[in-house]
Image (cartoon, coloured by chain):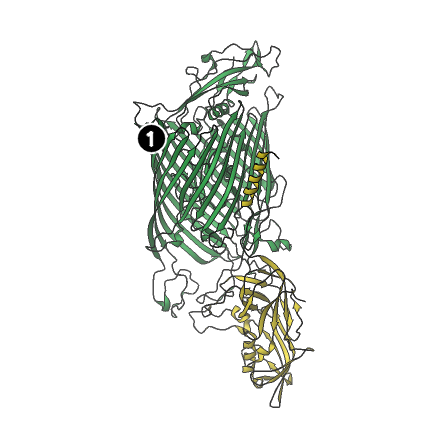
Chain colours: A yellow, B green
Amino acid sequence: MHRNTTFALAFVAAAAGMGCVGDTGEDLIHFAAFAGGALGASNGTYAFESGRGYQVELTRARLHVGAMYLNRSRPSDVVSDTTCTLAGIYVAEVTSGLDVDALNPELQRFPADGFATTERAITGELWLSGGEIDVVGDPTVILDVAGRATKQGDGYPFEGRFTIGANRVVVPSDPALPGREPICKQRVVTPIGTDIVPSAEGGLVLRIDPKGWFGNVDFKTLDEDPGDPALYRFADEESNQASNSLYDGLHASGGVYSFEWDEGGGP
Amino acid sequence: MPKVLTQVEPVFPPAALADHRDGTVALAVTVGSDGTVTAVEVLESGGTDFDEAAMSAVRQWMFSPAMRGDRAIAVKIRVPIRFVPPTRTGPEAPLAPATSGTPRVQASPKATAVPTARTTRAPPAADAAAPAEQPFPDPEAAGASEVTVTGRRQPPVVAASDHRIEVGALAMVPRQNAAGMLTLAPGIYLSNDGGEGHAERVYLRGFDAREGQDIEFSVGGVPVNESGNLHGNGFADLHFIIPELVTRLRVVEGPFDPRQGNYAVAGSAEYELGLEKRGLTTKYGFGSFDTHRMLLLWGPPGESIHTFGGAEIATTDGYGENRDARRASAMAQYEGAMGKIGSWRVAGSAYATEYHSAGLLREDDFAAGRKGFYDTYDFGQGGGGSRFSLSGDIESRSGAFTLHQQLFAVRRTMRLRENFTGFLLDVQEPIQEPHQQRGDLFDLSMGETTLGARGSAGTSGIVLGQKHDLELGYFVRGDGVDATRQRIGAGSDDPYLTETDLHSTLVDVGLYGDATVRATPWLSLHGGVRADLFTFDVLDACAVQSVSRPSQTDPPGDASCLHQQRGGEYREPTQRSSTAAVKLMPRVTLTVGPVRHFSFSLSYGQGVRSIDPNYITQDVGTPFASIDAYEGGVSYARTFGDALSLSAKSVFFVTHVDRDLAFSETEGRSILGGGTTRAGWSGSLRVAGDFFDENANVTLVRSAFDDTGLLVPYVPDVVVRSDTALFHDLPWRLAGAVPRATLGAGISYIGRRALPYGQRSDTIFTVDASATLGWRAYEIGVEVQNLLDRQYRLSELNFTADFESAPAATLVPARHFAAGAPRTVMVTFAATFGGS
């Protein structure tokens, strides 16, 4: 090859090498998302002892998960936080809802894949909503449980269905701060500690252990079902200790929900 | 013999003017039987620049045809043209006057420039179109009168990347607007996600200069950058410029000239206006998407090309959803002479626009079929604005100095409504009544009045046998800016939140000294220093927007600009801040040119961008964005024979910015970020001949953050552009006149741009083309943009937005894009009366 031509080609190649090299870091990926019930559950039942000493056997435990999110940062100022979202940068999201059978330890796939960056996440969130997070009215049944609790020979067959809508609106105590208790605060379970770096090969798994929901539930405070005196029913509003505790347990950010990254991408 | 009926004056080549060079060009001009100039050849060259200027002008001359008996015939005549720079008066001083004043181009039978003599004897059997035998015409009878062209002092070439671009025939390449002409310079890519009336976002040689925040723009010396614009400090909207009135561009791709001031971070671009075609030109175009454009241009015959008037009105429904637009613009200038010592100009412009914008679309919504490629989320997006400017200047010789003084006034309004994030930013404040996300559409409005002046005194002289130049100058502008930004409720058009309400007085005073010292004719050191003082006086009328513990008896509720502090303690909602700072910037270039046609240069310069008034804090020194730029380049210029000129440049460059800007979708504008460095190479080529003009450039660049080494997002690292013009008379006649045809083509290739999160955009490859057919005073044409009808993404960004297209909120950064225009066809009709 002519020497000048060689030189010219080498020059162009070197110059071209200056462009199209490098990147801005990280990546954007799609991933499969799953949820699974308690690992100790079998044959559609899950038995455990609650924090208040009740022997509980769950025969139905379904949770509607509206969305899942992972965030790069941990909330630092929860007192003034009235927003529905964290201030940090979100790393992953699964925006298609799923009714999770919490008594089935097998992984249940969300209808649509999630989307993520490949940054490290240390906080997870569950959005317990059937619609927009900040719209008060929402008839979606978020939690549907049934089972039997016994303690010292007393039995409490129970059922409960929780919605989060106007029945859960909290009236602020300070009239100067009317927006201090937005409805989204009732629907977002956060912060759920985790340590995940999403990657193109894996999938996100939400594990739900219903035991934590009932940790502080005192079943004897439940009211009988007017239509079936043999059944105790959780009230879908602020009511007795048992109903309030189960509702609080639904929002427990520790001990109930956990996120993990399945490098295998799920089943 | 032919007689001159219309004589278009040549333009004195700026470089020759700067060097005080004179020259004579002898042309062989073929005058057709219809009196038009059908061919021009250089018989005696005066140098490339003089040759081109002379040929360009003479091609536009009109003659009464030579007659043989009763029959008009074609003849070839000799036309010498002499270029005379301003005459010096008095004895030569040690530092003699710089090249300035009133250079004259003589094309007069009484002087040395006349259509005086024929040189070619054509065959007797030649057809009517061929030059025929003619006696030497009598100069007086030729009818050419003395022409004096008033030239202006041109700044010296300061670096290899100092691009002086004559638009010339390349004006026939289709462009969206005058901003599109910037791509004649290397490394420039334009995008626009804000609509027809929104300023183009400019990427220049590794910089994301946004809507001009990093490029100093001026038109006829009047600054365009808008200090204190809330959308971006230095925002520059070029849509008021009528493209047909742009004769020349000077693009300096770095801060290498002491004349460059605020915002010259990536560089500067100066538009020079003029109108070479004299007479009254009317043009009407219509085309795709119900687009219409009416244009009037007026160049009084006998006046300088810098005396002109122009007006346009344009409307379009726009492609896809919500892209309709309307605009009108008028520009006028008069240039007069002050005897032979100088000239003066007054200029004015008026512009108004109103438009809608489609904004950005999420890629996943398009991929899932939830949105079409040209759809929009928010029909409230768009904007409007107006701009009025008035300027006057004088350039004259006074003793040993050339003096220039310009005053300008600009009034600008702008309204911008954009929604980048959908329903994401309406944070529920505890003091507010409970609410849902009301929508992130922001409504930004601004009114700005700019008054300013610039001036300089230049001189030059011979020391130790070499010519040296010196210029001292100043620039001052004051801006009064009122700017607000509110958020608008989706569907209601009601503002629910005032985010910003600023009233700013901004002043920039710059002084510079610039010198060129020559050791030999081929070795020179050029440079100087510039100092700018920036003062800021900002009244924030919405200084408090939230109170953690408000008064229980008088809670502020949903009010935006609060007068309470914690516990309900009273304070005014306003707060004033003022500060000032000075920046000193050296700039220097070493030029070596021992080899004929070649010039090598090394350049260094510092630039500055003043800060957004948003960031001003009382008595805290104004933070600047400072740039250090280095480049080394080689330029080549040569003519081959009489009809081919070639110029080429190769430039390697490195630039560093200590505080770069990064686009924030939540703010809807760019905010301060970290330091960045970019390194690259650009090459450019221009080849012109009798029937063609080609301008091409390639730029490769790597732009990275200093702290991480990661690429700066959105900046294209490969930019390739070609502009081609072909023009020639057709080989047949129509009703006694020779039709003239032109073809224009613009080809752009933009490499895959780096996007946040390791992504790359699509490449962009577009072809635009035009064709015209001219006959006598009439012209019909067609312009096609995106000839291949490629579906491409004009801009692509990764950020977080929630347009409620998924069951739950989308909070992870995702790909968004603004659709480029599909194939767009415009048919134009033009007629010119009373001129050439």
Q: From the viewer's perspective, tell me whether residue A233 is left or right of residue B541.
A: right
Q: Position of residue A134 (x, y in %)?
A: 53, 66
User: Disc 1 on helix, strand or loop?
Assistant: strand
Question: Mark 1 sits on what residue?
Answer: B459
Hey, which residue is sitting farthest bottom in the picture?
A153
Label 1 sits on what residue type? Thr
Estimate the x, y position of residue A39 in percent, counting from the top left. 64, 75
Give the residue at x 62% y 21%: B733
Q: Residue at x 43, y 22 (%)?
A: B23
- The picture places residue B167, in percent across and down from the top left corner, at 50, 32
Q: Is residue B215 above or below residue B524?
A: below
Instruction: Please name whichever residue, B508 or B627, is drawn nearer the observer in this view of the structure.
Output: B627
Look at the picture and state if A101 lies above or below B483: below
Mark 1, residues whose alpha carbon is within 10 Å: few (<14), some, or many (≥20)? many
Residue B409, horizontal then vertical, whole percent = 38, 40
In the rendered image, which quarter is residue B735 located in? top right
How many marks can you see?
1
> Which chain does the numbered disc 1 sit on?
B
Q: Is residue B757 left or right of residue B395?
A: right
| Quadrant in the rendering for residue A201 | bottom right
When the figure is inspected, residue B575 is found, relative to residue B430, above or below; the finding is: above
Residue situated in front as seen by the camera: A133 or B99: B99
- On the question of residue B785 being in view, the answer is no
Q: Is residue A11 above or below residue B364?
A: above
Q: Can residue A32 be seen?
A: yes
